[in-house]
Image: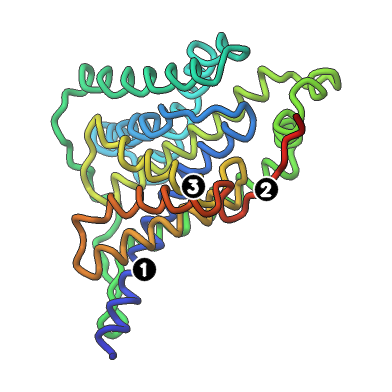
Amino acid sequence: MGSAGDLILQQLINGISLGSIYALIALGYTMVYGIIQLINFAHGDVMMVGAYIGWFCTTVLKFSFLPALIVAMFLSAVLGVIIERIAYKPLRNATRLAALITAIGMSFFLEYGGMLIVTPQTRTFPSVFPQTVYTFGNVAFKYGDIVIVITTVILMLLLQFIVKYTKTGKAMRAVSYDKDAANLMGINVNNTISATFALGSALAAAAGVLIGVYFNTIDPLMGIMPGLKAFIAAVLGGIGIIPGAMLGGLAMGLIESIVSGIGYSTWRDAAAFIILIVVLLIKPNGLLGKNIREKV
């Protein structure tokens, strides 16, 4: 029983580290959807750009973890605003399908534009943390795991503070509730949407750097799978609901780790999509979503 208990505990630790990263990416999906009802499928690729900026800062510029993280978040936030202004703003009043197709197109543009600039080869992310391993009995976790969880918690608390207590956060909530009414009240809707993209992209970049640290490798197509899994995490928690994204991300990480831990590591990606199908069948609004009847 001891060894089984240790195995479960080990997978929980691994799952929390991975789930924290998924939660950060899922927050960007959820914020953008909450404001303009758009699934930004380019979000995972913004994460990839953030990972490459972090890699460049740590290998070429010899930055330590924190400055590299801040630079990656800032530049990705700028990229997020540019994408929104060029690709999504002209389609504000178009059909949802048009915006969705544009998001997929932007995703391909970032992936293959990335391949053109940085070449398709996989790059090794440098060791930015000491290789210290802490062991309690038969359970081990790395120094990096602790930093990943702490970084994620700090960023999530910061996001909650921005959304709840700042002027921009109040504007975001107003726009998500009723865009036209917010406009009439003097809120600059365009700037608020841009701020949402900037925040979401910054969180995605942080996740990209953390994924680089966690897996030690990055490549131009690295954003596809984590991006899809984070989207599933957002749906699982209730898309458009910030605590739901956090909960969904952690749940996804834990499920993936448990599936790997019991010897079905080849099924861990499939598990994510099975969860999506089950959630959509049983509770389409997600764990924290509410059933809202639309008046005809």
Closer to the chain start, of discs 3 and 1, is: 1
Q: Are circles 1 and 2 on residues that touch, CB within 8 Å?
A: no
Q: Tell me the amino acid under the disc marked 2.
A: Asn
* Percent x, y of residue 50: 37, 33
Disc 1 element = helix
Q: Are circles 3 and 1 on residues that touch, CB within 8 Å?
A: no
Q: Which residue is mark 3?
A: 280
Disc assigned to residue 1? none
Name the residue at 33% across, 64% down. 14
Disc assigned to residue 291? 2
Q: CA distance from mark 3 to mark 1?
A: 28 Å
Q: Tell me the amino acid under the disc marked 3.
A: Leu
Give the foreground label among 3 and 1. 3
Q: CA distance from mark 3 to mark 2?
A: 13 Å
Q: Tell me the amino acid under the disc marked 1.
A: Ile
* Percent x, y of residue 272: 35, 51
Residue furthest out toward the left: 121
Name the residue at 51% across, 37% down. 28
Residue nearer the viewer, 217 or 33: 33
Name the residue at 22% across, 45% down. 126
